[in-house]
Image: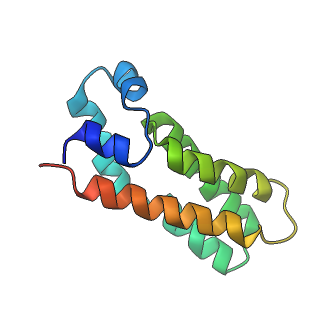
Amino acid sequence: MLLKECYERIGGDYDGVLSRMISEATVKKFAVKFLSDKSYDLLISSLENADLKEAFRAAHTLKGICQNLGFNMLFGSVDPLTESLRNADAPPPKELVEAVKRDYEKTVSAIAMLDE
């Protein structure tokens, strides 16, 4: 799959990220690097352990990465989760967590299909 097709599949802002990073090779390099980022894993494990402070930190980091890489679909689901965790004293609504899980899986699946 070509990079532009990948961005279309994940509801990403290909043109926006390309204008910031200048070359497609740079965009692809950082998109592929996203597969090894641990923010999502930390978010999920922190939620499972009811560590809401750490879950907020991980969600906030994931949100920033998605914004920088133009992963709009995933950004759109992680943003409300992040805000629900800000100063939270109770777990976030399950539907927010499920939306992030769904969009994360779509995103990493599409990136994994990029042409080498």
Which residue: 45% across, 43% down? 11
Q: Quadrant of residue 49?
A: bottom right
Given the current orientation, which residue lies at the most extreme bottom position? 49
Q: Is residue 98 left or right of residue 22?
A: right
Give the answer, above or below, for where 16 lies relative to 1. above
Asked if one can make out residue 36 in the rendered structure from this viewpoint, the answer is no
Task: Between residue 72 and residue 86, name the one nearer to us.
Answer: 72
Which residue: 53% across, 37% down? 67
> Where does the image place residue 86, in percent across and percent down from the top left?
79, 53
How many circles with numbers are drawn on the protein? 0
Given the current orientation, which residue lies at the most extreme right position? 89
Q: Is residue 21 left or right of residue 26?
A: right
Give the answer, above or below, for where 21 lies relative to 110. above
Which residue: 43% across, 64% down? 105
Q: Is residue 12 left or right of residue 91?
A: left
Color theme of the render: rainbow
> Where does the image place residue 30, in percent across and percent down from the top left?
32, 41
Asked if one can make out residue 41 in the rendered structure from this viewpoint, the answer is yes
Q: Quadrant of residue 19?
A: top left
> Where does the image place residue 29, in percent across and percent down from the top left?
25, 41
Which residue: 37% across, 25% down? 15
> Where does the image place residue 77, in percent across and percent down from the top left?
61, 53
Give the answer, above or below, for where 103 lies relative to 98. above
Q: Is residue 93 left or right of residue 58?
A: right
